[in-house]
Amino acid sequence: MTGLATRWASQFYATLGDNRAAADELREASLRSDLARWTAALTAVVARTVEALGLSPTAKGFPCTVLPVKRSEYLGQDVMAFEASSTGWKFPVAVCELENSTSDDLVAYSLWKVLCVRCGLRVVLCYRPEADAAAPLVAQLAGVVVSAMPIAERSALSGETLVVVGSRNEASTFPYGFFQAWKLNPNTGRFERFARQ
């Protein structure tokens, strides 16, 4: 069976490919360094990706329909995904944080936040103007956030964790070269390049 991270990444690119207006909005926001606009556009794309996977999203503009308390955000997470088939208190299937700050500490905080949630998929989407800044950022995240977890806890971590970095200077290859993804290897505590299937 294909892992949730692979299905999510494939659907993320499909959502961008199917909705040219949303993809153009995201690309233009990144080229103009309008990070508030980038976050709003990306939130919609991520929520629609969740819907296309048959899950129920909750995010700004996508209020929850499956939990007893109806909100747009829970636990301070930008996007959450729940099984759509039933109502009542249930745990999320996936959580996503969208961090538009250039502060490495704020991106690390986003990773820490998603790692605190028990679910099948945790995703941090962030932005760097230059593509060559992505790999050092991801290595730093492993060094400051993942390494803080005791080895026994880290190696027993359930679910999958992705860090996806968008970069302005790869906008000509949008969306495929624009977004670079890494997946956490819980055994080594390092992020490894993750290619969509």
Image (cartoon, rainbow, N blue to C red):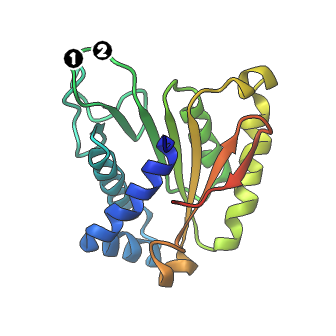
Asked where in the image residue 38 lies, by quadrant, the reply is bottom left
Name the residue rendered at 45%, 37% in the picture.
95
Q: Position of residue 36 (x, y in %)?
A: 39, 60
Is 125 situated left or right of 132 in this image? left
Q: Pinpoint residue 7: horizontal percent, then vertical percent.
A: 44, 49
* Residue for badge 1: 68
* Element under disc 1: loop
User: Could you tell me residue 39's position as x and y percent?
Assistant: 40, 57
Identify the amino acid type marked 2: Trp
Is residue 122 shown above or below 152?
below
Crowdedness of circle 2 by 10 Å Cα count: few (<14), some, many (20+)? Answer: few
Above or below, 156 against 60 in this view is above
Left or right of 27, for residue 124: right
Looking at the image, which residue is at 29% across and 39% down?
A: 57
Vertical comparison of 83 with 102: above or below = above
Any mark on residue 89, and which? 2
Farthest residue, direction front: 1
* Quadrant of the rendered image containing residue 50: top left
Q: Position of residue 172 (x, y in %)?
A: 49, 85
Other-residue count near label 1 (Cα within 10 Å), few / some / many at <14 / 14–19 / ≥20:
few
Question: Quick check: marks 1 and 2 in contact, CB under 8 Å?
Answer: yes
